């Protein structure tokens, strides 16, 4: 069998992988708004730092599984790791339905971190395997669009269920159905994509030991360092939406359903626009949309606490989604460009480790700021972090689009990127 790359050539499996990542998004989206309010109103948690603990556990566990999931997938294949991710998710609805206290929820989010670290990592790797280099940005954009579209829909659906039937158990019945469906589809329908990588990676000498990839993707390469720090800091925004939005917006008078609509706008705009922004990076390069996205998202987070009224919060949430759509898929694509096919999955795992550790770092920062100062101050701190990180990205990141980079080298007026960039 010839393993030729291309989205059109491999569209049945590519479409199935889009359905799978949509289910991954539904799984995390089902927790987005319901769980923080569940902690405050049902389990009696008052501390913002304690409520943030479930995001800390999720972020650091997902980061670790991203790192090793990429490495394992190059040894065992993408499909077994994907299935393992869905198996890890099976107990989550049971934990959330019967949790007697907040620490059970925090422990349940360890399983969510394992699930997301394995299942989403394998989904994006599989799409990159199938697509090839010419449409890599478009493939990642599609992956993130469907994934974060699932996050938005999951948050919206569970908020509607919670408003009608209560915070539990009804919303988590929906979550259980999604997990079972996706597990069965992964076992019976998903095919292994590792052979596509083996056909692409003809240069066996390009193999690097795991430790060397970890070093190179963290600090040994200026562009990969810029991507790693930007990925980590932009997760502060998502942690803010997860922790602070439900608490802040309900405290100023919005209902749970209205908060769900605000978060749904954020996730929907982020998800849908990635259908365009991933392709945009194939046309104009990766660096411009990343840099613009960092500053747009930071500015809109700042504007959220200046807004006053439901329609204003819908608007600022949408603008935040625009910024995230510009930066998010293209950071992944930068790493996919810079890594050799033989260690691309591991390199992406290192990037995703640092990126999703941002959930943990961000949740701690947000929780401490909200506890010691105010929830409003947490918005200002996250906005400032985005501005600083965006500046670092502008200074350190080099263009990785092969054709545009080659054109830059041919132009005597443009300084060619250094070997480490």
Image (tube, rainbow, N blue to C red):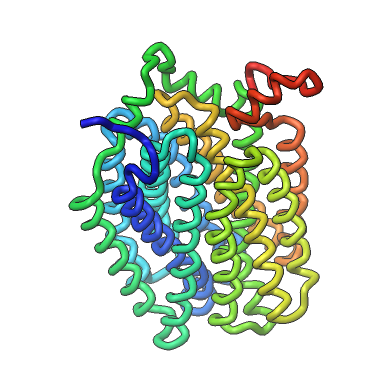
Q: Residue furthest top?
A: 205
Q: Position of residue 37 (x, y in %)?
A: 52, 74
Relative to residue 42, is residue 13 drawn left or right? left
Q: Is residue 104 above or below residue 40?
A: above
Residue nearer the viewer, 29 or 99: 29
Question: Does residue 110 show up?
Answer: yes
Examine the image and state in which quarter residue 179 appears.
bottom left
Q: What residue is shown at x 27% (from left), y 42% (from top)? A: 79
Q: Residue furthest left?
A: 188
Relative to residue 82, is residue 161 drawn left or right? right
Question: Does residue 107 show up?
Answer: no
Number of marks in the rendered image? 0
Q: Position of residue 284 (x, y in %)?
A: 66, 40
| Quadrant assignment for the N terminus | top left
Q: Is residue 413 above or below residue 275?
A: above
Q: What residue is shown at x 25% (from left), y 48% (from top)? A: 190
Q: Position of residue 399 (x, y in %)?
A: 66, 31
Q: What residue is shown at x 55% (from left), y 80% (from top)? A: 256
| Quadrant assignment for the C terminus | top right
Residue nearer the viewer, 44 or 239: 239
Q: Position of residue 101 (x, y in %)?
A: 42, 69
Examine the image and state in which quarter residue 248 appears.
bottom right
Q: Residue furthest bottom?
A: 164
Residue nearer the viewer, 115 or 5: 5
Relative to residue 337, is residue 96 drawn left or right? left
Q: Is residue 184 above or below residue 11?
A: below
Q: What residue is shown at x 67% (from left), y 84% (from top)? A: 253
Q: Is residue 55 above or below residue 250?
A: above
């Amino acid at each position: 069998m010839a393993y030729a790359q291309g989205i059109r050539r491999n569209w049945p499996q590519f479409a199935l992988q889009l359905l799978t990542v949509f289910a991954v998004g539904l799984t995390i989206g089902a927790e987005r708004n319901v769980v923080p309010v569940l902690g405050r109103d049902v389990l009696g948690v008052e501390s913002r730092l304690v409520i943030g603990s479930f995001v800390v556990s999720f972020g650091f566990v997902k980061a670790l599984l991203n790192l090793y999931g990429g490495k394992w997938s190059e040894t065992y294949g993408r499909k077994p790791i994907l299935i393992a991710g869905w198996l890890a998710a099976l107990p989550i609805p049971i934990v959330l339905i019967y949790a007697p206290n907040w620490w059970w929820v925090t422990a349940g989010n360890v399983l969510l971190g394992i699930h997301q670290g394995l299942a989403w990592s394998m989904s994006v790797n599989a799409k990159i395997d199938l697509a090839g280099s010419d449409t890599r940005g478009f493939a990642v954009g599609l992956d993130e669009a469907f994934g974060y579209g699932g996050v938005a829909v999951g948050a919206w659906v569970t908020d509607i269920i919670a408003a009608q039937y209560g915070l539990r158990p009804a919303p988590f019945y929906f979550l259980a159905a999604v997990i079972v469906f996706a597990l069965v589809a992964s076992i019976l329908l998903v095919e292994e994509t590792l052979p596509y990588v083996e056909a692409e990676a003809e240069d066996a000498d390009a193999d690097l030991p795991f430790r060397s990839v970890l070093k190179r993707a963290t600090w040994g390469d200026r562009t990969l360092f810029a991507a790693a720090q930007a990925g980590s800091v932009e997760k502060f925004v998502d942690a803010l939406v997860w922790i602070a939005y439900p608490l802040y917006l309900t405290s100023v008078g919005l209902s749970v359903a209205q908060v769900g609509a605000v978060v749904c706008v954020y996730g929907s705009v982020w998800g849908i626009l990635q259908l365009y922004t991933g392709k945009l990076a194939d046309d104009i390069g990766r660096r411009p949309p990343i840099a613009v996205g960092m500053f747009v998202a930071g500015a809109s987070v700042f504007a959220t606490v200046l807004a006053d009224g439901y329609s204003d919060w819908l608007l600022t949430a949408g603008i935040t989604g625009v910024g995230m759509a510009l930066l998010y898929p293209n950071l992944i694509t930068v790493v996919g460009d810079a890594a050799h096919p033989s260690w691309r999955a591991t390199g992406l795992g290192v990037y995703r480790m640092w990126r999703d550790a941002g959930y943990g770092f961000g949740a701690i920062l947000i929780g401490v700021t909200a506890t010691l100062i105010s929830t409003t101050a947490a918005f200002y701190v996250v906005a400032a972090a985005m501005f600083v990180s965006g500046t670092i990205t502008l200074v350190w990141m080099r263009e990785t689009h092969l054709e545009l980079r080659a054109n830059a080298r041919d132009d005597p007026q443009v300084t060619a990127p250094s070997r480490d960039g």
